[in-house]
Image (spheres, rainbow, N blue to C red):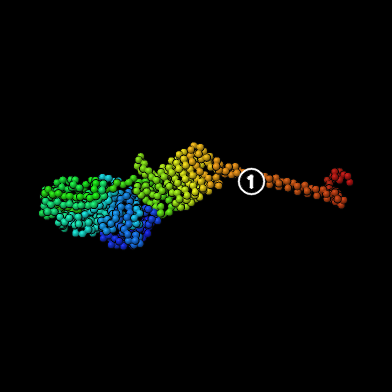
Amino acid sequence: MWSKDEFYSGGSAANASVRSGVTPVELMTLRYFQITDGPENCYNVTVPNGHYVIRLYFAYGQFDNSNKEPLFDISLEGTLVHSLKQGWSSTPDLSYAEFRAFISDGAATICFHSTGHGNPSVLSIEVLQILNDAYDIGQKSTILKTVQRVSCGSKDSKFGVEYSANAWGGDRFWATDKDLDMGLSRTITTTRSVQHASDAPNLVPEAVFQSASETPVGSPLTYFLDVEPNQNYSIWFYFAEIDPAITGKEQRVFDILVNNIPIFSEFDIIGKAGRPFTGVTLKSFLPIDGKVLTLRFDPRQGGILINGFEIFQVIQTEFTTMETEVWALQTMKKSLGLPPRLGWNGDPCVPQVHPWNGVDCHFDNEKGTWIIDGLDLDNQGIKGFLSNDMALLQNLQSLNLSGNSISGSIPSNVGKLSNLVVLDLSFNQLNGSIPESLGSLTHLRKLFLNSNLLSGEVPTVLGAGPIHGASFNFSDNPGLCGIPGLRSCSGALAKGSITAIVVTIILVVFIGGLCGFVIYKRRQNIARAQKLSTAREAPYAKSRTGNAALKDLQMVKPPGRERYVPHYMQHT
C-alpha cells in the first residue's frame, strides 16, 4: 500500500508523463523541487532503528521539467549515494535506485540535491525493513547500493512479491539475464523444491534457485556489467545443482573470476552443497578500478551453471555533524525565519559536495565528527530574531548576520561562544543593551554592531578592545554611549542611577508635600485665633462676653468658697 507524501517534505506535486518500464504501473504522480524550494530537500521517514532497503523510482513530466530529463544527486543519512546520469530515463536499470543501510537515529533521511540541471523529481520512496545480519560484509558503517540483481535463466524480470518471497527479504527486483550472457547459455528450470534456498539472513526467493543458465561442457560463461570506477564491490553468487544429469561431486567444477582475478577456484556445487537441489551462497569483496565489472566462469569439468547473483557498490558512510550543533542550526532556521531558497535541510556538512548555504564546516579528528566553525548569512533578507540556542555552537569562530532585518535583543548566551573571533551583526534592527557577557569573549578580534537600534552604556571591557588591536564598531546606534566615538553617558545615566534618582525625587516630593500640609494647617489655626481676638475687642462683644462668662462661672460656684473672678475680668 502506497502512502501520500504530503507531510514528509516540501516541493510540489505533478503528474508523471515520462516513466520507466520497470516502474510499478500504479505510480502516476511525482514530487519535484524548484530552486525556490532550496538546493536540498529531504524526506524524514520515521522508522525503528534497524537495517533497511530503501528504493527510489524517478520520473518527470511537462509541468515539473518541461519534459526534459533532470539530473540531480541523492544522499542517504548524509552520505552521497547516487547521481542521476544523462539517459537514465531511457534505461530501465537506471530509472530506480536501491540501497541497504542501517538507521540508528529513528528516521531514514533521504535528500535530493539540485545540481543545476532541472528540478529534482521523485516518483516513489520505499523503506522496507530487513534482517540486521542480511548481506553482512563485516562493516556496519557502509551503505550497499544495488548495481545488478539477476535471476539467471528466468524468462521475465520480477519483484520478490511475484516470487512469493519472504517479506523480510525486502521485495527485491530480480532481472533476467537473457540480455547479459551474450546468448551462449541455455535455460534450465525445475519445479522441485530446493533445500536451504530461502535461508536467513538473505532470504533469497526459492524461485531464483529453481532456474539457471547453463553452458555446454567445456564452454565458459561471461557477464559484463557497467560500474562506477575506483570503488569497492560486494558480490553474492547463488547456486543449486538442478540439472538431473549431474548427480555427484566433481561432475561440474569451474573457476570464478572477477575482472580476470580468480576469487573462487575449482568450485564444485554439489561438493559444496552436499547433494543436488540444495542452495549454496558465495560472497566476495573486492575493489574495481575500471568502469566495467566482468564476471567470468571458466570450466574445469563439465559446463557452467549459475542460478543468480547480486552486485553491490560498497559506499563508506560519511561522518555526520555533531548533533547538538545540528539542533542549534535547526532552531536558528526557525527563529531567523530563513527563506526556503536557502534550504538548510538534512545534514549541514555532508554530503561534502552539498553543504548548507552559508555554513562553514571543519572535521574534528579527535571527536570523529563535523563541527560548525562559521556562519555567513549576510544580506539574505532575514527578518527573525536571535535564538538562545546559538550558544550550542561551541566551535563557532565567525558569525556574520549583517545587512538583514533581524530584530530583538542580543542574547546574553552569545557570550558563551568562547571560540568566537568575528561577530558581525551590523545593519540590522537589534535593540536593547549590549550584553556584558560579550566581554568574556577573549578571542574576539572583530565586533561590528553598528547601524542598529542598541541603547545604553557600552560595557567597559569592550571599550578597551581597540587598545589591544581589535576592531570594534558601535556607531550609528543613537542610544549607545560611554566609549570614545560615542556620546558621553553623563546625560544618559545607567539604569541603577536612574532608579535611584527617581526614588529620591519621590521621597522629596512626599516630604515636601507633608511639610506644606503642616504649615498650611498651622496658618489656618493662627488665622482663626486672630479672628477670634478681633471679635472680642468690639464693645458689644466685651459686655456680652463678660456677663456670659460671669453667669457661667457663677452657675458652677462651689458652695462655701469665695467667688472666683478670672484675671481677664479683674479690670471690670
Q: For this view, does 526 lie left or right of residue 123?
A: right
Q: Nearer the viewer, residue 71 or 245?
A: 71
Q: Dot 1: within a 10 Å radius of its alpha carbon, few (fewer than 14), some, or many (20 or more) residues? A: few
**Which residue reaches farthest right?**
572
Check disc 1 and give the amino acid type. Ile
- The answer to whether residue 172 is visible is yes
* Residue pictured at 14% horizontal, 56% vertical: 186
The number of discs equals 1
Q: For this view, does 110 lie left or right of residue 263?
A: right
Q: For this view, does 183 lie left or right of residue 397?
A: left
Residue 425 position within the rendered picture, expressed as x and y whole percent measured from the top left: 48, 46
Residue 352 position within the rendered picture, expressed as x and y whole percent measured from the top left: 35, 47
Q: Circle 1 sits on which residue?
A: 506
Q: For this view, does 543 lie left or right of residue 64?
A: right
**Which residue reaches farthest top?**
468
* Residue pictured at 32% horizontal, 59% vertical: 68
Q: Nearer the viewer, residue 193 or 553?
A: 193
* Residue pictured at 50% horizontal, 39% vertical: 466
Q: Is residue 553 above or below residue 87?
A: above
Residue 441 position within the rendered picture, expressed as x and y whole percent measured from the top left: 47, 40
Which quadrant: the N terminus?
Answer: bottom left
Q: Secondary structure at mark 1?
A: helix
* Residue pictured at 35% horizontal, 39% vertical: 366
- The answer to whether residue 164 is visible is no
Residue 560 position within the rendered picture, expressed as x and y whole percent measured from the top left: 85, 44
